[in-house]
């Protein structure tokens, strides 16, 4: 029986653990926290994520805990709809409270026999397959997976010509217990100058809101929210702003991007945000994480030599993540840096991104899952107990 030690019990580590345990590997997942929990509010789960979650046999159970969206709109502050996309087929999207996703994956990983060790901090790894723990212990395995997020200790320990850079955009996220502002199953991104507010239902009784602004916009950075300032910029959302102003535990982050020249060294693979962390403008971080984990399991099934399997995996699927990272950065720059004096051109550009199919296909390549890499998701071999 082959063995794998996985650093990180987030979406990437749990999904990878579930898939390899299902394939008969001895799996151990190390999570540094005392529980498997997600920071942040809601999450868009797009077609590529759904295909993997369906294959793991957990998506059906998740559906009632989230909302299936019918359309996505971009609205300017005056309420005019400047882009509308129907979310069906390969563009389907559900929104969930984040905790729903990790708990479903945790259940799957354990159901397939993976061991999850909490309070277990990893310090690094060697290309020969040794996992080094922060307490000085070491363990040898056939494969080490670094799924330990943007500041990955595994990645740093391997001199992979890599790094994590913060971008000058901030994002606040809220999950509120109300559907007053999201009665329809649609997600709306409201634009006003260089600020954006996304509002979307997230299950029967909750609404997920994200608010984005350039870091240089001092009023936008104030926490708790400067309700008056945001309401002036988004008058139609003044009621929602009042509600958000009363939320005590909102989170504020900078966008960030991970550059990682190689996703593997020897017997060590880096997956998820550790390999390709990206601005969340396309809502695809978890999607890429899940399809790359799926593809890795696929290549390990096809090629018994672990090191060769890792090289083939990266060669075969990396282009999807690279393209998505590049587009997510362009989207961030476009929305953050667009000069006010060129505002008159924005509606046309926004419209064309929604309607020109070839442009959309390129920007949203990740929505199509692993098809573009010649891998069909499904028939992976059974469901979690
Ligand atoms: C603001 C924002 C909004 C987003 N919205 C979306 C969205 O709508 N849709 C989408 O698909 N994606 C979205 N994403 C991206 C998505 O959240 C991530 O891509 C995904 O969570 C990555 O999962 P991961 O497991 O690779 O990393 P993480 O979620 O960061 O998990 C890493 C885990 O490893 C643990 N860990 C870290 N270091 C160690 C260590 N040394 N030892 C042991 N354990 C360790 C951490 O505690 C954590 O549990 C968003 C991201 C952000 C920042």
Image (cartoon, helix red, strand yellow):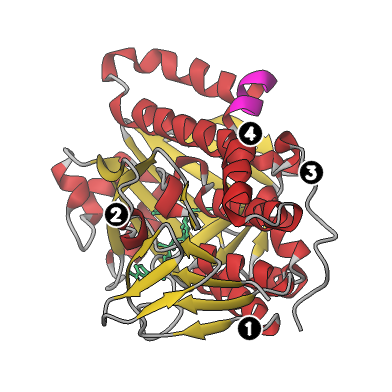
Label 1 sits on a secondary structure element that is helix
Q: In which quarter of the image is residue 50?
A: bottom right
| Residue 263 x %, y % | 47, 46
Q: How far apart are marks 2 and 4 (CA)?
A: 29 Å
Left or right of residue 175: residue 252? left
> Quick check: 371 above or below 245?
above
Res. 365 mark: 4
Question: Bounds of the magenta span?
Answer: 356-362
Q: Mark 1 points at which residue?
A: 110
Which residue, as the protein is rendered here, is positioned at the far right? 379
> Quick check: 38 above or below 72?
below
Q: Which of marks 4 and 3 is nearer the N terminus?
A: 3
Camera sees residue 47? yes
Mark 3 or mark 2, whichever is nearer to me: 2
| Callout 3–callout 1 Cβ contact below 8 Å | no
| Residue 373 x %, y % | 71, 37
Q: Is residue 361 covered in magenta?
A: yes
Q: Name the residue under label 3.
A: 89
Q: Residue at x 44, y 57 (%)?
A: 209
Q: Quadrant of ligand 1?
A: bottom left
Left or right of residue 164: residue 363? right
| Residue 203 x %, y % | 61, 69
- Between 99 and 304, the one lying in front of the other is 304
């Amino acid at each position: 029986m082959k063995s794998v030690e996985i650093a990180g019990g987030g979406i990437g580590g749990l999904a990878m653990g579930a898939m390899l345990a299902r394939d008969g590997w001895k799996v151990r997942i190390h999570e540094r926290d005392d529980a498997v929990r997600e920071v942040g509010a809601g999450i868009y789960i797009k077609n590529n994520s759904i295909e993997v979650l369906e294959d793991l046999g957990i998506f059906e159970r998740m559906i009632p805990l989230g909302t299936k969206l019918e359309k996505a709109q971009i609205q300017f502050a005056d309420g005019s709809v400047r882009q509308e996309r129907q979310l069906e087929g390969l563009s389907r999207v559900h929104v969930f409270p984040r905790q729903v996703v990790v708990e479903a994956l945790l259940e799957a990983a354990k159901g397939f026999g993976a061991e999850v060790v909490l309070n277990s901090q990893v310090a690094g790894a060697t290309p020969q397959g040794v996992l080094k723990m922060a307490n000085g212990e070491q363990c040898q395995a056939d494969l080490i997976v670094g799924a330990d997020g943007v500041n990955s200790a595994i990645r740093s320990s391997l001199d992979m010509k890599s790094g994590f850079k913060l971008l000058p955009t901030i994002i606040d996220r809220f999950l509120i217990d109300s559907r007053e502002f999201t009665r329809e199953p649609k997600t709306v991104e409201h634009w006003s100058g260089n600020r954006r507010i996304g509002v979307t239902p997230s299950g029967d009784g909750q609404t997920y809101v994200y608010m984005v602004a350039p870091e240089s916009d001092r009023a936008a950075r104030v926490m708790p929210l400067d309700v008056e300032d945001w309401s002036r910029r988004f008058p139609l959302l003044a009621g929602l702003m009042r509600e958000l102003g009363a939320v005590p535990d909102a989170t504020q982050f900078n966008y960030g991007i991970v550059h990682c020249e190689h996703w593997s060294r020897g017997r060590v693979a880096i997956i998820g945000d550790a390999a390709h962390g990206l601005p969340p403008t396309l809502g695809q971080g978890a999607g890429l994480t899940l399809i790359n984990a799926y593809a890795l399991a696929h290549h390990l099934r096809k090629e018994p030599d672990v090191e060769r399997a890792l090289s083939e995996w990266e060669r075969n699927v990396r282009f999807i993540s690279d393209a998505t990272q590049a587009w997510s950065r362009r989207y961030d720059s476009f929305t953050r840096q667009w000069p006010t004096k060129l505002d008159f051109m924005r509606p046309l550009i926004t419209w064309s991104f929604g309607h020109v199919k070839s442009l959309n296909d390129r920007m949203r390549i990740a929505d199509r899952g692993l098809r573009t890499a010649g891998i069909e998701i499904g028939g992976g071999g059974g469901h979690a107990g």
